[in-house]
Image (cartoon, grey):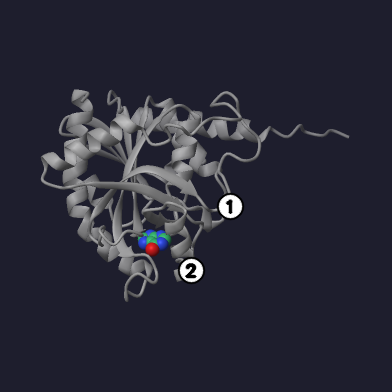
């Protein structure tokens, strides 16, 4: 009996990456972005700053995520901000959507194929620190993975990175310093802290928030760490910040909901745009 040999899984993903990169290249022409910016919940406004914008829906790109959460549209907006070539990503998938890490790997490795070497990751997060309030931004200095899962588990494709890799500089210290300085230049004091990833989609219990504080966390959320790990695996630098949308459960009387997250992120979003625009100028200038 004729039996067709099944294509290895990583080969299917790499085919998708090559096809997606070719589609993007054909649409962005000579633009060569070195940095991509993932826009978290409610932070999509930065994409409006992109000049000569080329919009590419993820549905045009094989293997790309199909975000299902409101506030995550699922498209690339590529162009320049202050003359710096960028790709902004409106919409991400989260582990709690139950789709695994493959789509995220295809997305990030496609960016790598296009020559992106720095990922700016943003998100909405709850604060664990009384001195960091809703509406503020917090730079991500490091993270703690309390999700019980890891996007790098399963088969490793050595062509992208090693099976085992260190996380000593998971969040690039130099870029974090630049980000903090850029914020200061536009009049924003950017505190920095440790982001704790919990799987979601439930918000935390008050007891979980006490635990997250106790283990050394400053903020808590349901995203971003997978993106960081996949980007570091293939040798990209990672920098980013959270829009604080609420105090962790039990730290205030707010009732948490996704709508609340989106409305508060929109407030922090104004500072976010200012900080990232300045960061891009400083990043380009190399200091
Ligand atoms: N917990 C988890 N994720 C979040 C929160 C929170 O308090 N706020 C925004 N995203």
**Residue with the mark numbered 2:** 207
Going by the image, does 22 lie left or right of 191?
right
What is the x, y in percent for residue 110?
A: 45, 32
Q: Answer with left or right where residue 235 lies relative to residue 218.
A: right
Nearer the camera: disc 2 or disc 1: 2
Instruction: Please tell me which residue is depicted at 46% across the width and 66% down the height of the picture.
Output: 204
Please, is residue 24 above or below residue 70 in the view? Answer: above
Asked if one can make out residue 155 in the rendered structure from this viewpoint, the answer is yes
Q: Quadrant of residue 69?
A: bottom left
Q: Check disc 1: other Cα within 10 Å, few if <14, some if 14-19, many if 20+.
A: few
User: For mark 1, what is the residue?
Assistant: 148
- Decide which of 102, 242 is in the foreground and name it: 242
Q: How many badges with numbers are in the image? A: 2
Residue placed at 22% from the left, 46% from the top? 190
Is residue 256 positioned above or below 68 on the image?
A: below
If you read the primary sequence from the N terminus, does the residue marked by circle 2 or circle 1 appear first?
Answer: 1
Horizontal side, residue 23 vs residue 160: left or right: left
Q: Please identify the residue farthest to the right as the structure is shown.
A: 1
- Left or right relative to 155: residue 180: left
Numbered label attached to residue 111: none
Residue 62 visible to the viewer: no
Residue 148: percent from left, percent from top: 58, 52
Quadrant holding the C terminus: top left
Mark 2, Cα crowd under 10 Å, few <14 / some 14-19 / many 20+, is few
Question: Residue at 31% across / 69% down in the picture?
Answer: 260
Ligand 1 lies under 8 Å from the Cβ of mark 2? no
Q: Marks 2/1: CA distance?
A: 17 Å
User: Quick check: 3 above or below 49?
Assistant: above
């Amino acid at each position: 009996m004729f039996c067709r040999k099944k294509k290895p899984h990583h080969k299917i993903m790499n085919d998708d990456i090559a096809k997606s990169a070719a589609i993007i290249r054909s649409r962005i022409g000579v633009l060569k972005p070195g940095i991509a910016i993932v826009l978290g919940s409610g932070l999509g406004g930065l994409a409006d700053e992109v000049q000569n914008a080329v919009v590419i829906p993820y549905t045009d790109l094989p293997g790309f995520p199909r975000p299902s959460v409101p506030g995550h549209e699922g498209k690339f907006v590529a162009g320049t901000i202050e003359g710096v070539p960028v790709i902004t990503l409106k919409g991400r998938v989260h582990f709690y959507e139950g789709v695994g890490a493959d789509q995220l790997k295809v997305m990030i490795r496609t960016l790598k194929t296009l020559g992106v070497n720095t990922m700016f990751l943003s998100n909405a997060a709850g604060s664990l620190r009384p001195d960091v309030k809703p509406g503020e931004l917090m730079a991500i200095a490091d993270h703690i993975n309390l999700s019980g899962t890891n996007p790098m588990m399963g088969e490793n494709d050595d062509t992208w990175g090693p099976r085992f890799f260190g996380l000593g500089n998971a969040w690039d210290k130099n870029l974090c310093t630049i980000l903090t300085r850029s914020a200061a230049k536009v009049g924003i004091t950017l505190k920095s802290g440790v982001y704790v990833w919990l799987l979601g989609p439930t918000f935390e219990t008050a007891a979980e928030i006490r635990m997250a504080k106790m283990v050394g966390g400053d903020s808590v959320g349901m995203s971003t760490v997978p993106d960081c790990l996949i980007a570091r695996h293939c040798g990209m630098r990672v920098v980013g910040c959270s829009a604080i949308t609420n105090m962790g459960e039990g730290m205030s009387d707010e009732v948490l909901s996704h709508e609340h997250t989106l409305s508060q992120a929109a407030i922090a979003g104004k500072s976010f745009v200012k900080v990232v625009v300045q960061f891009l100028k400083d990043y380009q200038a190399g200091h």
